[in-house]
Image (spheres, helix red, strand yellow):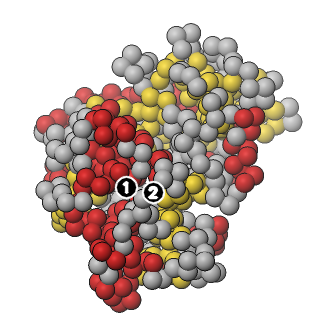
């Protein structure tokens, strides 16, 4: 596929069409290979089988509560062909929370596995079916690829509902159209030169956007093979890269840090891995990963909603997200006026929603996201004199200290310099006159005197940024996508280890 055709593709169907007869590339899982030809034929059988279980008078929404694997990939391809709308259900959620997600998403069929079936109680209005059951097996075996003809989809057609990671509250179901997968997939394949000789590694949860947009769709656009891991494993990463000849992998959150904690191997830099693409890795981890593995690490800024994207350039400072390029702006959240350099504001898309198609079943949340006629990320940042953007936290994490608004991320970046602090979360501690700065430290044998001396030595830590409430913990709770689950963290905290 030429770069021109990749760039012009606007639906997943267009990306997949050239792969229908490809038998020398495909999908690897658990050591077994399935060619694209057979994989896509299986996807059409799955679409045909699902159609026999769906009521055409209701939304054709099929929930999947599955671990990563070839089954999930087949079902996503079936949705890409227009067979139904896939609903990614988060396997780290439980009981009533999962039921609420499935009801909100109007699932009428939910496919589970023996490992996940016990997680889900009965869902009103939905039928739950085990993909290993005799019924599902017989329906898929009774179907042929010719029983389902791929639909001529439109870029705006709903393809999947993906729930946000829920770092600060209840997850929302993001409407994901054909274009939300196809356009970034084509762009990234073109940007990184991903082609038939590449192998794309998927270890991030496939019920989330990162794996499907920054991984699966990139492979489809490049005509590459995919190697799927059941789940992310820091120790298994190196084995899989060597086993499958991985050249491109995606990540979100802290995986680079976890991989770097594994023992180095003599051939780490000779594996063939050339691109790691994701977001939220620290500057130190990006640099060390590149040194150890010889791979280019490209860390960007984005979200499941896809309303704003910021990409690093070669001259971007280590701690910055990238250059500020219109229509992205950093504004005062109340007035929408562009803030001056060095002032914390909200990252917005001034031109409109970008690739954001709204939240399913939540018009109020959709309207709030587009408040003021611009796309509101809810993320804080500041811009330096040279026009580079620096992440400063979430609006929900905005601290109001002595009448000044402060972001949490710059404080966290300073605290991570301490050699005994392996992870940190900064949060506001309510007081009668605003917030005090709280720091939750994952630390090894750190005492108050040592910490206070460290703070004294940090010349770029302002007096109002200095933590006054400190908790020492063993670990921070995480979402399924390796981000700190702040709402769970706040709920778990007792009295501070010390206050000052």
Q: Is residue 273 visible?
A: yes
Quadrant in the picture for residue 38: bottom left
Q: Mark 1 highlights which residue?
A: 13
Whether residue 156 sits left or right of residue 222 in the image: it is: right
Mark 2 or mark 1: which comes first in sequence? 1
Q: Is residue 408 visible?
A: no
Quadrant in the picture for residue 387: top right
Residue, x 69% and y 19% (percent of image)?
Answer: 338
- Confirm or deny contact between disc 2 and disc 1 (CB under 8 A): yes
Residue, x 53% and y 47% (percent of image)?
Answer: 304
Residue, x 39% and y 16% (percent of image)?
Answer: 315
Q: Mark 2 highlights which residue?
A: 153
* Image x and y of residue 496, in percent: 67, 43
Crowd rating for badge 1 (residues with CA inside 10 Å; few <14, some 14–19, many 20+): many
- Which one is nearer the viewer's eye here, 336 or 142? 142
Residue, x 78% and y 25% (percent of image)?
Answer: 335
- Mark 2 and mark 1: span between their CA atoms? 7 Å
- Which one is nearer the viewer's eye here, 494 or 94? 94
Whether residue 453 sits left or right of residue 12 in the image: it is: right
């Amino acid at each position: 596929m030429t770069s021109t055709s990749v760039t012009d593709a606007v639906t997943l169907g267009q990306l997949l069409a050239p792969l229908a007869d490809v038998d020398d590339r495909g999908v690897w899982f658990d050591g077994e290979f399935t060619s694209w030809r057979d994989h896509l034929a299986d996807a059409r059988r799955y679409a045909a089988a699902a159609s026999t279980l769906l009521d055409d008078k209701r939304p054709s929404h099929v929930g999947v509560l599955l671990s990563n694997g070839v089954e999930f990939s087949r079902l996503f391809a079936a949705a890409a062909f227009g067979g139904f709308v896939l609903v990614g259900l988060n396997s780290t959620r439980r009981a009533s929370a999962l039921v609420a997600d499935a009801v909100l998403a109007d699932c009428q069929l939910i496919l589970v596995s023996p490992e996940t079936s016990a997680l889900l109680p009965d869902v009103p209005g939905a039928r739950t079916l085990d993909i290993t059951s005799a019924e599902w097996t017989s329906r898929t075996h009774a179907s042929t690829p010719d029983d389902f003809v791929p639909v001529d989809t439109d870029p705006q057609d709903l393809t999947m509902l993906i729930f946000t990671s829920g770092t600060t509250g209840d997850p929302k179901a993001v409407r994901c159209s054909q274009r939300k997968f196809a356009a970034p997939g084509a762009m990234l394949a073109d940007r990184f030169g991903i082609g038939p000789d590449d192998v794309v590694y998927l270890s991030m949860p496939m019920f989330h956007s990162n794996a499907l947009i920054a991984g699966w769709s990139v492979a489809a656009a490049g005509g590459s093979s995919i190697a799927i891991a059941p789940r992310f494993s820091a120790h298994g990463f190196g084995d899989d890269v060597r086993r499958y000849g991985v050249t491109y992998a995606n990540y979100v959150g802290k995986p680079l840090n976890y991989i770097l904690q594994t023992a180095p191997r003599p051939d780490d830099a000779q594996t063939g891995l050339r691109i790691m693409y994701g977001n939220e890795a620290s500057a130190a981890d990006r640099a060390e990963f590149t040194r150890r593995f010889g791979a280019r690490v490209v860390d960007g800024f984005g979200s499941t909603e896809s309303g704003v994207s910021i990409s690093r350039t070669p001259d971007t400072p280590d701690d910055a997200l990238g250059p500020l390029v219109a229509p992205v702006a950093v504004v005062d959240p109340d007035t929408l006026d562009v803030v001056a350099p060095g002032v914390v504001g909200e990252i917005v898309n001034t031109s409109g929603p970008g690739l954001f198609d709204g939240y399913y079943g939540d018009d109020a949340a959709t309207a709030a996201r587009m408040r003021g006629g611009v796309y509101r990320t809810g993320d804080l940042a500041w811009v330096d004199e040279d026009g580079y953007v620096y992440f400063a936290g979430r609006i929900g994490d905005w601290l109001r200290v002595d009448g000044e608004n402060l972001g949490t991320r710059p404080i966290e970046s300073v605290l991570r310099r301490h050699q005994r602090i392996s992870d940190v979360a900064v949060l506001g501690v309510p007081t009668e006159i605003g917030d005090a700065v709280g720091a939750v430290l994952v630390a090894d044998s750190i005492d108050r005197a040592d910490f206070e001396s460290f703070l004294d030595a940090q010349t770029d830590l302002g007096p109002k940024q200095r933590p006054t409430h400190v908790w020492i913990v063993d670990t921070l709770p995480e979402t399924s996508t390796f981000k700190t689950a702040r709402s769970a963290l706040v709920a778990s905290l007792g009295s501070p280890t010390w206050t000052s």
